[in-house]
Amino acid sequence: MSITEPTPAVGLISGEQSIELLAGQHPNGEHIVERVLVSIEAAPGQLRYRLLKSPLFVRGIARGDIIAKMAEPKGAFTVLQNGGNLCIRVFCKSNIDVLEQALSPALEKLDGDLDVKEPGALVYSIHVSSGFTAIEKILNDKVQAKGDAAWFYGNVYDPVSGEPLNWWQAILAPE
């Protein structure tokens, strides 16, 4: 595994720095990438990127995480440090505005933030210390009431094995 990037492929979204990360693979084999907002952090021998918002499709990361891009395949990355946030993705077949109006105030009470709002999708970042139980109660109540929506964690389960990533254990451990 190579973690190198001599010349960063950094672009702009609304004037902010962004990079392309691997979000999946099309059935034809083509890699699918998502452009995410980052700040660049220089470290000896490598470029590091801090995510400024949780992504909609890229799995395994959330706002505040520090990542390094890998040489291959395009957009591949490794998590160097978890920022402590959960990435919560909400998908809705009908009017997403109604669901956002119900969810945002409830999640804001737990210091959650809406990072992405797209037609049919919302992405929230919320610190893991808010508690899985409290977060899931809000999501289950509001999303199930809508009927045509579903929510998923974006960075809790391994995308291949489905096993919990457990990155939060160190953050929640008593000192």
Image (cartoon, rainbow, N blue to C red):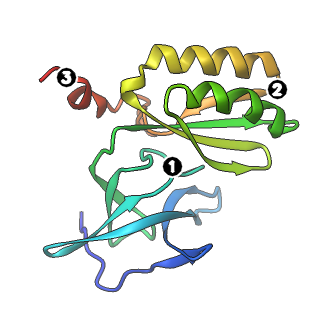
Q: Work out whether 82 lies above or below 103.
A: below
Q: Which residue is mark 2?
A: 148
Secondary structure at badge 2 equals loop
Residue 80 at x, y percent in the picture? 25, 53
How far is disc 2 from disc 1 in space, using C-alphas? 23 Å
Identify the residue shown where x is 28% and y is 84%. Answer: 6
Residue 174 at x, y percent in the picture? 16, 20
Horizontal side of 78 relative to 53 (left or right) equals: left
**First in sequence: mark 2 or mark 1?**
1
Amino acid type at image mark 1:
Ser
Q: Quadrant of residue 141?
A: top right
Nearer to us of marks 2 and 1 is 1
Say which of 102 and 24 sits in front. 102
Q: Residues within 10 Å of mark 2 (few under 14, many from 20)?
A: few
Amino acid type at image mark 2:
Asp
Q: Which residue is mark 3?
A: 173
Q: Which residue is mark 1?
A: 54
Q: Residues within 10 Å of mark 3 (few under 14, many from 20)?
A: few
